[in-house]
Amino acid sequence: MKPTQIYQIAIILAFVALLEVLCLTKVIDKITMPAPHFILRDFFLMIIHGRYFHEVGQSMFNVMIAFVSAFVIGIITGTILHAYRLVRDVMDPLFATYYAIPVFAFYPLFIMIFGLGDGPQVLIGYMLGVVAVIVTILNGLDRVPRVLKKTARINRLSPFQTAIRVTLPFCAPFLLTAAKLALAYAFIGVIGSEFIMARSGMGYEIGHAYTNFDNATMYPLILLLLLISIFMNGILTAWEKVLLARRGQA
């Protein structure tokens, strides 16, 4: 284990220990937050009894749909925009100010169009993630050496072949960065939407538990959500490190 990883674990354990002390000394009252060891107990009980597995599966399925759609469409859109400078110059101001727009404000409109199903939640997760992917891909394509593009032209590759065989493989680290951003925004969009107005899902159950002061449900679900997001992001980070190591950039 690397020293940085040891320090990271030590910081997390120190933070948990501080919360434990604050809860046991009643600086943080039990209505606000139970002690971490109670949260762990309730977490394991929830896993053992299989509670909320359906809700967790539903939320993760929606997150994956939002993530994959934002990632794939973002890559395609970014690659096309990079080939048309004028269109990109027109769109750049929109990309720069996009996240100043409160996407969640459109949730009532999406409900009117798509109903109270999973559609509005997936759409918000997609909308939050796709622009981050586009901007990241454009940044990566800007760094492709001219010699690679010239080599593609000499070999008479089509724009599609150039993207598949030359530019996008060169931008692989940026693709993984875009994937991590899309995944994070997909979680934010889907789970956040479930808080606002949904009939099921992890966000709905957490919000319902919060409303009813059910800390034995709320905090274990929050912990499970954190563990899932960290695990999925860790897979992408590990893949990124392997790729950079192969390129001698680690």
Image: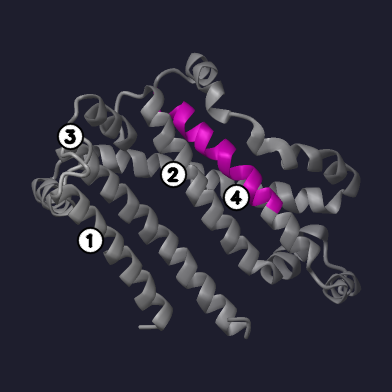
- Marks 2,1: beta carbons within 8 A: no
Inspect the image, locate mark 1, and give the three-letter code of the amino acid beneath it. Ala
**Residue 72, labelled with which disc?**
4
Tag nearer the camera, 4 or 2: 2
Tag nearer the camera, 4 or 3: 3
Label 2 environment density (alpha carbons within 10 Å; few <14, some 14–19, many ≥20) = many
- Marks 3,2: beta carbons within 8 A: no
Residue drawn at (37%, 29%), measured in percent from left and top?
Answer: 195
Q: Main secondary structure of the magenta part?
A: helix
Label 4 environment density (alpha carbons within 10 Å; few <14, some 14–19, many ≥20) = some
**Quadrant in which the N terminus appears:** bottom left
Nearer to me, 106 or 122: 106
**Residue 31, labelled with which disc?**
3
Tag nearer the camera, 3 or 2: 3
| Element carrying mark 1 | helix
Inspect the image, locate mark 4, and give the three-letter code of the amino acid beneath it. Val
Distance in Å between CA atoms under marks 4 and 2: 17 Å
